[in-house]
Amino acid sequence: MKTINKLIVLILMFTSVVFSSCDKEYLDELPTEDISAVSATETADNLLAIVNGIHRSLYLTYQGSQGKGGIGAMMIQNDALGEDYVMTGAANGWFNNAYKWNDHTNANDSDDLFPYRTYYRIIRNANIVINGADGATGDEALKNAAKGQALFYRAWAHFQMVQLYGKRYEAGTENAQLGIPIRLTAGSGPLARNTVEEVYTQVNQDLDDAIVALGEYSRINKSHIDRSVAQGLKARVALVQGNYLVAAEYAEMAQEGYTLMNADDYFNNFSDYGSDEWMWGSHIVEDHTLFFANYGAFISRNYSSSNIRGNPKAINSTLYNTIPSTDVRSTIFDPSGDHLNLPTGVSLLPTHGLRPYTSQKFLAVGTGDSRMDVPYMRVSEMYLIEAEAKARLGAADAASALLDMAIVRDPSYTLSTNTGTALVDEILLQRRWELWGEGFRFYDLKRMNLPLDRNGANHIQALTIVFDVPVGDNRWQWLIPQDALDANPLLVQNPL
């Protein structure tokens, strides 16, 4: 009973830490504060309770800010930095400064701090589970399930962060450029920034260990992590590293047990994490809603928030015009903006702004309920990773790997006759159509060393401001937050 009481206190303290405002101590303090991490991890059930807290932390409001609604808000940040996601109005201002490349280039900006703060909290709590699992009592399978998921989260959070705050990974080099500090304990000591190579080495080791630990785990729902999700992340990491053999292998393995949505489901029911296509996502139940901070409060077409009414999100018009009319993905954007063809039961209010090329890919529960499931990984991404990796390797079956996905989206699609760079470009175009709004574009531009180019499309000058960012520009690295520098004297700032 004493241990259970301590665990309850731990969970309550975790919640209070998550909701606390901009104190610097989050960078180094233990989440358990004066409670022994050993006590918190005495049993397998306790370990799983902490892991459940991590799952829940993906959709909390951080720093008391409507614009910091968990991982969904970070996905919007990353797409707002790209060229495919278009703001159509100023509305109430949320994410407008990210769109202008102002937030992450200001070390004192709370939106520059937001990912740094949030991911290290996830890492810290994952470390409690990882370091306590071997000494816990209880069912071995449950301990493995908890430890495997914690290893996944530690890998995922380090991977997300190094892509933001470090320089890009360059295959075939030493990658001695500065990444982020690797944290493997819940300790409070200051740490220097590890190299990018060191971070990726740790990420891969954690994923390999997670895949083994999760081998027999059957999860209760898709907010939890199983082996396929760990394999999917392994494929993502390998793609960024240019390790195309591994990327193709793990992407193919991760597809097992999943089925691509048919056109009807894609159009009518995309935002349902129960879909056979979704691998990992958060399902927001009514009593856990974040209201105006939900992902759906910013990116859905139908919720009646001032942000969506005044700034319905659009696809880059040039990109839209490359989608064949026979492809279902052309139907989830409306070039007229009138949205006369909405799924059954979905409606817009007279106050909803009507703008060209706006999206109806994401739909909230209703005009008065912003909840919608948040997609972190879908199996279509695995098809695209497999196809891209094989195309870059010059594999004979690369076009067939693309066909397996593309023909489900467009029944008129035929096996590509492209090879080499032309085939890679075709796959990357499909990737942009498929993953619009799901938080990938900044990462993709950076991993491929491509410039930002918003010219010639429907970006509005007064809202966009920044139309071009060349490769090699310092702005491709987010600044280390000033609060982190103040709390940790071993940190070094990125070039300004």
Image: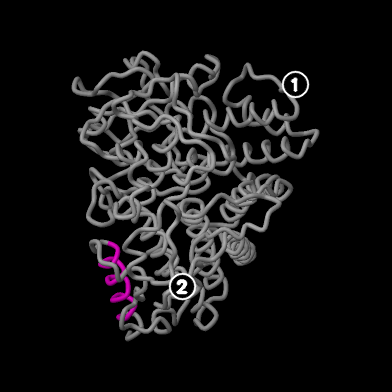
Left or right of 139? Residue 103 is left
**Place of residue 478 in the rendered image (x, y in percent of width and height, measured from the top left):** 42, 50
CA distance for labels 2 and 1: 51 Å
Q: Secondary structure at mark 2?
A: loop
Residue tagged 2: 191
Q: What segment is highlighted magenta in the picture?
A: 5-18
Disc marking residue 417: 1
Q: Secondary structure at mark 1?
A: loop
| Image: 361 above or below 383 | above
Residue ranking furthest to the bottom: 2
Q: 118 left or right of 306?
A: right
Crowd rating for badge 1 (residues with CA inside 10 Å; few <14, some 14–19, many 20+): few
Residue at the image position 45 percent from the left and 26 percent from the top? 267
Q: Are marks 2 and 1 in contact (CB under 8 Å)?
A: no
The residue that appears at 29% across and 52% down in the rendered structure is: 109
Magenta stretch: dominant secondary structure: helix
Position of residue 158 measured from the top left corner of the image (x, y, whole percent): 50, 60
Q: Residue at left 63%, top 24%? A: 407
Name the mark on residue 56: none
In the picture shown, does residue 457 fall above or below 41?
above
Query: Relative to 258, is 266 on the left or the right?
Result: left
For the residue marked with disc 1, what is the amino acid?
A: Thr
Q: Is residue 261 at least partly visible in the picture?
A: yes
- 70 in magenta: no
- Residue 52 seen: no
